[in-house]
Image (spheres, helix red, strand yellow):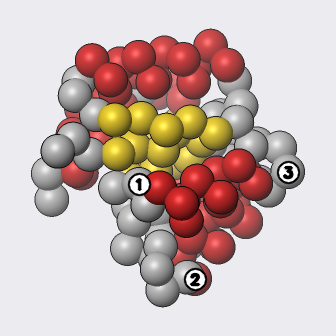
């Protein structure tokens, strides 16, 4: 059975590109363009990994990450942050809040992200 990846991204073109590449790599994908939808999907579908943007509508990525990591049912789901926030403080905050990794969008290609997800999902 393929691993379920939830992609939480409000930029439609990037969301589509990520979904397409992860599907090609053999993952089942779920998508959400805002934090409320993502939170609902997390509890309904129980993804194996979450790719999370920080700047998203309704519930931002920071608040969503805190909700994920503070709930006994969801705290074990690995979260990889992808964000335009590339400063060290944001990166440190994401890791301190429990993200498995923090990738600045400008520093990584979609192929790099897919490879990162593959390596994390094999753990």
> Which class describes the residues within 10 Å of circle 3: few (<14), some (14-19), or many (20+)?
few
Relative to residue 96, is residue 84 drawn left or right? right
Q: Which of the two discs, 3 and 2, labels the residue nearer the N terminus?
A: 3
Relative to residue 114, is residue 54 drawn left or right? right
> Which class describes the residues within 10 Å of circle 2: few (<14), some (14-19), or many (20+)?
some
Residue 93, image x and y in percent? 60, 65
* Residue labelled with disc 1: 47
Quadrant assignment for the C terminus: bottom left
Residue 57, image x and y in percent? 83, 44
Q: Which label was assigned to residue 90?
A: none
Residues at marks 1 and 3 touching, judged by CB atoms closer than 8 Å: no
Label 3 to label 2: alpha-carbon separation: 19 Å
Q: Which label was assigned to residue 70?
A: 2
Relative to residue 105, is residue 23 drawn left or right? left
User: Is 22 situated above or below 9?
Assistant: above
Residues at marks 3 and 2 touching, judged by CB atoms closer than 8 Å: no
User: Extreme right residue here?
Assistant: 58
> Which class describes the residues within 10 Å of circle 1: few (<14), some (14-19), or many (20+)?
many
Q: Is residue 89 visible?
A: no
Relative to residue 100, is residue 2 drawn left or right? left
Q: Nearer the viewer, residue 116 or 92?
A: 116
Please state the total of marks drawn on the protein image: 3
Question: Element type at marker 2?
Answer: helix
Q: Mark 1 or mark 2: which is in front?
A: 1
For image coordinates 24% across by 51% down, the residue present is: 120
Label 1 to label 3: alpha-carbon separation: 20 Å
Question: Element type at marker 3?
Answer: loop
* Residue labelled with disc 3: 58
Question: Element type at marker 1?
Answer: loop
For image coordinates 69% across by 24% down, the residue present is: 11
């Amino acid at each position: 059975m393929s691993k379920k990846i939830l992609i939480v991204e409000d930029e439609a073109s990037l969301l589509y590109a990520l979904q397409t590449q992860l599907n090609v790599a053999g993952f089942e994908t779920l998508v959400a363009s805002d934090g409320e939808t993502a939170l609902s999907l997390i509890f309904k579908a129980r993804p194996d990994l979450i790719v999370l943007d920080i700047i998203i509508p309704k519930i931002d990525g920071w608040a969503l990450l805190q909700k994920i990591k503070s709930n006994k049912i969801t705290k074990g789901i690995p979260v990889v942050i992808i964000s335009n926030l590339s400063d060290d403080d944001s990166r440190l905050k994401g890791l301190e809040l429990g993200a498995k990794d923090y990738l600045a969008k400008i520093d990584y290609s979609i192929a790099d992200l897919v490879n990162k997800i593959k390596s994390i999902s094999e753990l």
